Image (cartoon, rainbow, N blue to C red):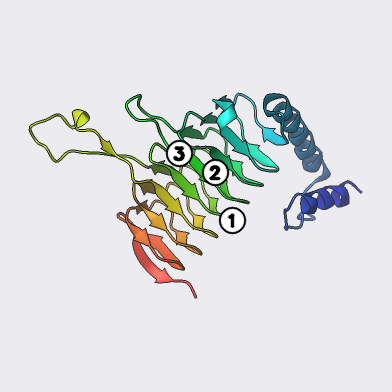
Amino acid sequence: MTRALIQKLLHKSGKTYTIDPRIPTSLLYRTIFTRIVMLVRGILRTGQKVYLGSSCQLLNRSNISFGRNVTIEHHTRLDGYASEKIVLGDCVKIGAYSNLLSTSHLATFGKGLKMGNHSAVGDFTHFGAPGGIEIGNDVIMGSYVSFHSENHNFADSSRLIREQGVTNRGIKIGNNVWVGAKVTFLDGCEVGNHCVVAAGAVVNGSFPDHSVIGGVPARILKTIG
């Protein structure tokens, strides 16, 4: 009975998977309890149906837009001080101990983050979003992924690098993309739709749809389909 009810609720919330019959009932009860606590906390903090873990920080909350059934795992920090709205689409999940940094320096007001529907990132994700990060729909990522949408200028050897300012071109990830653990995305990079990015890759430049990307620096390893 419990299993059937949870399965129904999952489908209602947009999840398409079937619960593994080997999952013990005790784990199901634990999951239900945890989700209820997160939901209550999220409603109290945001006034919306957000599943919010413990010890989360939501800075400038009024500039963060939550879709339906968003999950923010524990010890995550979201910086809403950005020139554009921070948008988290329906069923977005941000893993524990993640950090969104929208404005890194008072000299430049950052642009922020947009994540599409049914996209998720793993634990310890770092969103360096001064130049803006756009992530499409149905994007899944492993842990320790980092985004760096800002570059330091260094061409003038007569000046200190820290005094030469920065450039911000932004980062764009398409729809239906799988990103492995410990991938680094650098400012100005673009990844097309239906792509796979191998674990540990350092992504710079633009990559077309249906690409498998890997390496340091990343290159196209093969084409899907």
> Can you identify the residue that label 3 sits on?
127
Depth order, front residue of 128/2: 128
> Can you identify the residue that label 2 sits on?
122
| Residue 198, position as x, y percentages in the image | 43, 57
Depth order, front residue of 27/91: 91
Instruction: Say which amino acid is labelled 2.
Output: Gly
State which tag comes first along the sequence, 2 or 3: 2
> Can you identify the residue that label 1 sits on?
138
- Mark whose residue sits in front, 2 or 3: 3
| Residue 64, position as x, y percentages in the image | 57, 34
Q: Dot 2, how many residues are within 10 Å of its Cα: few (below 14), some (14-19), or many (20+)?
A: many
State which tag comes first along the sequence, 1 or 2: 2
User: To which quarter of the image does residue 110 belong?
Assistant: top left
Q: Residue at x 65, y 39 (%)?
A: 71
Q: Residue at x 53, y 37 (%)?
A: 85
Residue closest to the far bottom: 225
Residue closest to the far right: 1
Residue 133 to residue 62: above or below: below
Q: Is residue 28 left or right of residue 138?
A: right
Q: Dot 1, how many residues are within 10 Å of its Cα: few (below 14), some (14-19), or many (20+)?
A: some
Q: Residue at x 46, y 54 (%)?
A: 173
Instruction: Say which amino acid is labelled 3.
Output: Phe
Depth order, front residue of 32/66: 66
| Residue 120, position as x, y percentages in the image | 58, 47
Instruction: Say which amino acid is labelled 1.
Output: Asp
Under tag 3, what secondary structure?
strand
State which tag comes first along the sequence, 3 or 1: 3
